[in-house]
């Protein structure tokens, strides 16, 4: 293992590799995992090798030791699809979708859960906990079930029923908290401390970002060395975005790439804390940012895109740093635009996104309209979760099927325009 310590995103204080906490002991900020890139680079010179397509093939750049037994489910190795017909709708020539719905629990969150579970096993933890808007919980429940570990999931009581059913089916203890995601997060934190559980909660546990970064490694490999101009990431607490950025900066630190893509943040206007923060900081026009002085905005989130509905982004500072360092944009689109994007994506590509996972395409259209994205740019959208996880919301945009009598005449009437010779 080439992990060699931790560095605080806010005050930059460094901790040794055997540090046992999850947050900076000096300022309470989130911690970034650091590596001995010189040694890791020797192992991965020329790439990560072939092997079965799953995320632990990147072990040299992960904070986990080599395990004798393979991971019981295939996490990562998801497809990158060229979405030419969808891209054309916005005048884009090179649009790609990274289809994270192909992970075991049908969301991107499995990448984080996989790394956290390996850390939990090394820590001798019997119970892993998480606060979740839905997907992180069902992901943790899925992967703990595959290991015979137990999990306790805290969700807001408004989480979509399919995600809760999924978690319960995997055998997790699911506690639906009267309140929002932030209430569930605080309760999970307090309970994990009280009962000694290994807490997976995103934007608190520094290992989630490390699993998420493997998505960038795969995009790089699938594009055969081409670097995207932009990767557009749905953002709630900001951890997916900071993770994707970490992946690209790792590749550069390991000498595998020379330049970096821009990372764009896609949010709902009804949950836009990161966008507000970026706007405020850009307006302040400071030449040098003192990150230990930067606070991230809080909002009262009400978006129907539940996976990115967050009042206080727990990894907001790292996400804002990534947007600034990469030169990316932070774009908020309305819930109506997000809902409209679902059938556009599904109907043009065959990939059915949940509302949060449709936000990047809605944001791409906005950025093309605003002339931020040029037609020739290579753009990758992260499709973070399956539409089957919240089909009820998609139905609001898509409508219901036409009901007809069981007769050929009814079929003829219903489809009269389409089947005219
Ligand atoms: Zn600190």
Image: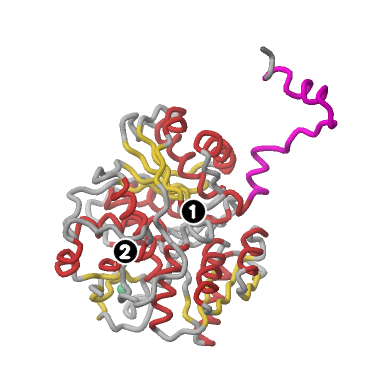
- Give the camera-side residue of 103 and 158: 103
Q: Residue at x 63, y 44 (%)?
A: 394
Question: Within 10 angstroms of label 2, few (less than 14), some, or many (20 or more) residues?
Answer: some
Mark 1 and mark 2: Cα distance apart in space:
18 Å
| Residue 67: % across, % down | 34, 76
Please tell me which of labels 1 and 2 falls first in the chain. Answer: 2
Helix, strand or loop for disc 2: helix
Q: Is mark 1 within 8 Å of ligand 1?
A: no
Residue 92's quadrant in the figure? top left
Q: Decide: is 320 above or below 355.
A: below
| Residue 128: % across, % down | 50, 78
Residue wearing tag 1: 102
Highlighted magenta segment, given as a residue range? 391-418
- Give the camera-side residue of 279 and 415: 415
| Magenta highlight on residue 121 | no
Q: Residue at x 81, y 25 (%)?
A: 408
Q: Is residue 178 visible?
A: yes
| Residue 221: % across, % down | 29, 50
| Residue 120: % across, % down | 43, 79
Query: How many tags in the picture?
Result: 2
**Ligand 1 sits in quadrant:** bottom left
Q: Residue at x 29, y 49 (%)?
A: 220
Q: Residue 57, labelled with which disc?
A: 2
Helix, strand or loop for disc 1: helix
**In the figure, is residue 218 to the left or right of 16?**
right
Q: Residue at x 38, y 64 (%)?
A: 211
Q: Is residue 243 visible?
A: no
């Amino acid at each position: 293992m080439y992990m060699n310590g931790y560095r605080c995103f806010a005050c930059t204080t460094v901790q040794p590799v055997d540090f046992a906490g999850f947050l900076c002991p000096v300022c309470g900020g989130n911690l970034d995992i650091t590596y001995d890139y010189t040694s890791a680079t020797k192992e991965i010179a020329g790439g990560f090798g072939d092997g079965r397509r799953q995320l632990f093939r990147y072990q040299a750049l992960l904070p986990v030791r080599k395990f004798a037994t393979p991971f019981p489910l295939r996490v990562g190795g998801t497809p990158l699809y060229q979405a030419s017909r969808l891209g054309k709708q916005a005048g884009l020539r090179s649009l790609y979708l990274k289809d994270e719905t192909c992970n075991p629990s049908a969301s991107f969150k499995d990448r984080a859960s996989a790394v956290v579970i390996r850390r939990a096993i090394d820590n001798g933890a019997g119970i892993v906990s998480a606060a979740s808007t839905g997907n992180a919980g069902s992901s943790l429940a899925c992967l703990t079930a595959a290991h015979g570990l137990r999990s306790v999931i805290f969700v807001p009581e408004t989480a979509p029923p399919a995600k809760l059913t999924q978690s319960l089916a995997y055998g997790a203890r699911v506690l639906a908290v009267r309140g929002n995601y932030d209430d569930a997060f605080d309760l999970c934190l307090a309970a994990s401390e009280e009962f000694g559980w290994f807490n997976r909660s995103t934007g608190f546990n520094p290992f989630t970002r490390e699993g998420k970064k493997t998505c960038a490694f795969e995009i790089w490999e699938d594009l055969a060395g081409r670097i995207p101009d932009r990767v557009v990431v749905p953002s709630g607490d900001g951890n997916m975005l900071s993770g994707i950025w970490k992946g690209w900066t790792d590749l550069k630190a390991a000498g595998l790439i020379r330049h970096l893509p821009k990372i764009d943040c896609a949010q709902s206007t009804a949950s836009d804390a990161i966008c507000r923060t970026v706007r405020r900081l850009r307006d302040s026009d400071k030449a040098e940012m003192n990150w230990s002085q930067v606070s991230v905005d809080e909002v009262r989130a009400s978006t129907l895109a539940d996976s990115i509905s967050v009042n206080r982004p727990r990894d907001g500072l790292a996400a804002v740093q990534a947007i600034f360092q990469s030169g990316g944009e932070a774009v908020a689109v309305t819930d109506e635009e997000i809902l409209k994007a679902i059938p556009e994506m599904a109907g043009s590509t065959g990939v059915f996104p949940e509302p949060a996972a449709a936000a990047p395409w809605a944001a791409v259209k906005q950025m093309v309209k605003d002339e931020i994205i040029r037609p020739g740019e290579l753009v990758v959208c992260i499709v973070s979760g399956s539409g089957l996880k919240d089909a009820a919301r998609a139905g609001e945009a898509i409508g219901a099927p036409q009901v007809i009598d069981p007769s050929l005449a009814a079929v003829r009437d219903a489809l009269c325009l389409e089947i005219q010779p």
